[in-house]
């Protein structure tokens, strides 16, 4: 147990959340030692499960007073190690803050606690003809708080935008325990856009305890077409051609043969047998959708689609998406271990980049399967490996990071929706110059000068090397400020 987490401190934490909401048993702490990125694991000192904003405030005030690092956690479905506990930290799990606080249909708003599951938002307003647009593949288990931390996306963000465009107002507890409101119930709040700064900050600026979300009216018509191709390049070219033809689908997704096979075995969506499957969803007024569907079907056929199939009804459409959203989990049928990577490239670079990724995987003797948001160029290569094979996990991690270099070289980004977390912090220097990173650090320090909120994430940590003098240890100024670490 850390000297920071004394018996007196534990007693105070117990008073705040109650006996049943404080976890310190080593076996139970293992549940929280990683998120969806299982290659990295660090057990926390303790886990707290608050049920109110007031309890979160008290916890953070105590952490601030005792200089205890903390990591906020939603459902733990993140794929970049964003909810990975830092060494010597406590985890604040928000899973019990899962109440829908208010539904305001006339103003198209819904206010929720951070532990509310993403798909439950749409379920709460579907009867009134509304939906919540951001739809990560994990939407049946991931939470709104985690979506805010990572600025989560999803298949329909091509047309409707990421989480940041759907959050109106937030209640946020800062790392020192202060309570602030960010944004407002109207679309354009005065002052600095603090919501824009906070959303996607990966829990490094504080903890969101309430959020008012923008909900949207369900389109009159929704149609999905499946187009089967003999090559992933032909599917990717169709994506570029659809956008170039001034069509804006609600979603465009590509799955390669391995992903199709895994999804088929897992949820039986009855996909065509092919090397690459392109899913295109169109929505809007029925007459408009029918015209658009004719146009995109022609484009797919001109690019060599061997089959185009329209999902015949709502049940068939939902089954198509169930297969796509199950693809990540279904990768477990292909390999005992895998890493889901997340990078972005220009759409026109899809054929060249995908070919390069396949060559890189072959050179390492590893398999990579691809399923991704093709419409916005957001790749999700899944690197398959077996941890029991000596050295294979290290090769898989190295390959997944080199994939990000390829994305940056193609004019893209190291992440589209999964965040940087622990996984990609060393790739930040590949994408950003020192002044860029220093500016981001200044923002972080303004919110969290003691570096307590989810430390050791996002930013690359340079290491200092030097001889230590005899006598009492004195921290180097860079180490004391949290910018570097001694080794």
Image (spheres, grey):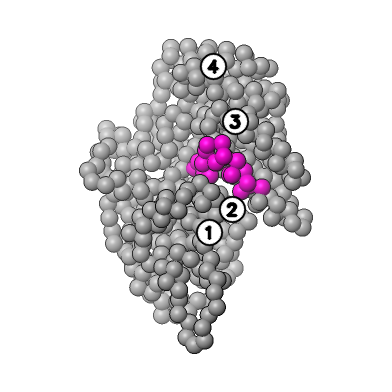
* 407 relative to 283 in the view: left or right: right
Label 3, secondary structure: give it: helix
Q: Earlier in the sequence, mark 1 or mark 2?
A: 2
Residue 94 numbered tag = none
Q: Name the residue under label 3.
A: 350
User: What range of the chain is rendered magenta?
Assistant: 399-418
State which mark lies toward you, 4 or 3.
Answer: 3
Quick check: 325 above or below 227?
below
Using a 10 Å C-alpha cutoff, classify the residue at mark 4 as few (fewer than 14 neighbours), some (14 to 19) or many (20 or more): many
Quick check: 354 above or below 208?
above
Q: Can residue 364 be seen in this view?
A: yes
Q: Which of marks 2 and 3 is nearer the N terminus?
A: 2
Q: Which of marks 4 and 1 is nearer the N terminus?
A: 1
Label 2, secondary structure: give it: loop
Q: Which of marks 4 and 2 is nearer the N terminus?
A: 2
State which mark lies toward you, 3 or 1.
Answer: 3
Question: Distance of mark 2 from mark 3, alpha carbons?
Answer: 25 Å
Label 4, secondary structure: give it: helix
Residue 84 numbered tag = 1
In percent of width and height, residue 193 lies at 29, 45
- Name the residue: 67% across, 22% down: 229
Residue 296 numbered tag = 4
Q: Mark 2 points at which residue?
A: 37
- Name the residue: 27% across, 32% down: 106
Quick check: 295 above or below 182?
above
Nearer-the-camera pick, 291 or 126? 291
Nearer-the-camera pick, 431 or 133? 431
Count every numbered label the image shows and give the total: 4
Answer whether labels 1 and 2 touch (C-beta < 8 Å): yes
């Amino acid at each position: 147990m850390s000297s920071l987490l004394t018996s007196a401190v534990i007693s105070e934490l117990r008073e705040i959340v109650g006996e049943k909401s404080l976890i310190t048993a080593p076996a139970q702490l293992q549940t929280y030692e990683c998120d969806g990125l299982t290659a990295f694991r660090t057990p926390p000192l303790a886990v707290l499960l608050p049920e109110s904003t007031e309890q979160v405030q008290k916890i953070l005030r105590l952490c601030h007073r005792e200089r205890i690092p903390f990591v906020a956690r939603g459902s733990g479905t993140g794929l970049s190690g964003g909810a990975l506990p830092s060494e010597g930290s406590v985890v604040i799990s928000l899973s019990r803050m899962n109440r829908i606080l208010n539904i305001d249909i006339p103003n198209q708003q819904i206010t929720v606690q951070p532990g509310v599951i993403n798909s439950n938002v749409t379920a709460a307003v579907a009867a009134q003809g509304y939906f919540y647009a951001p739809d990560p593949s994990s939407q049946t288990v991931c939470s709104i708080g985690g979506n805010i931390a990572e600025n989560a996306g999803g298949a329909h963000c091509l047309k409707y935008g990421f989480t940041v465009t759907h959050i109106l107002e937030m209640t946020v507890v800062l790392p020192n325990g202060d309570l602030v409101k960010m944004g407002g119930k109207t679309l354009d709040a005065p002052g600095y856009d603090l919501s824009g700064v906070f959303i996607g900050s990966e829990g490094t600026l504080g903890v969101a305890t309430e959020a008012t979300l923008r909900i949207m009216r369900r389109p009159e018509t929704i149609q999905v077409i499946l187009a089967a191709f003999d090559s992933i390049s032909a599917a990717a070219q169709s994506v570029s051609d659809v956008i170039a033809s001034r069509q804006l689908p609600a979603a465009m997704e590509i799955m390669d043969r391995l992903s199709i096979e895994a999804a088929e075995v897992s949820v039986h969506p009855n996909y065509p047998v092919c090397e690459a499957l392109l899913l295109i969803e169109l929505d809007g007024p029925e007459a408009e959708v029918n015209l658009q569907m004719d146009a995109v079907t022609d484009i797919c056929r001109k690019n060599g689609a061997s089959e185009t199939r329209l999902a015949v009804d709502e049940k068939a459409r939902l089954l198509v998406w169930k297969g796509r959203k199950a693809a990540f989990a279904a990768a477990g049928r292909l390999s005992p271990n895998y890493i889901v990577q997340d990078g972005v490239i220009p759409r026109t670079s899809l054929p060249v980049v995908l070919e390069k990724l396949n060559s890189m995987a072959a050179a390492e003797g590893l398999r990579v399967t691809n399923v991704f948001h093709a419409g916005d160029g957001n790749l999700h290569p899944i690197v398959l490996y077996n941890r029991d094979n000596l050295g294979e996990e290290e090769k898989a991690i190295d390959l997944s990071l080199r994939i990000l270099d390829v994305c940056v070289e193609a004019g893209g980004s190291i992440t589209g929706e999964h965040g940087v977390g622990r996984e990609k912090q060393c790739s930040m220097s590949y994408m950003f110059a020192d002044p860029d990173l220093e500016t981001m650090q200044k923002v972080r320090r303004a919110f969290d000068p003691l570096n307590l909120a989810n430390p050791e994430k996002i930013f690359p940590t340079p290491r200092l090397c030097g001889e230590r003098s005899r006598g009492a240890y004195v921290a180097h100024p860079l180490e004391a400020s949290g910018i570097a670490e001694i080794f």
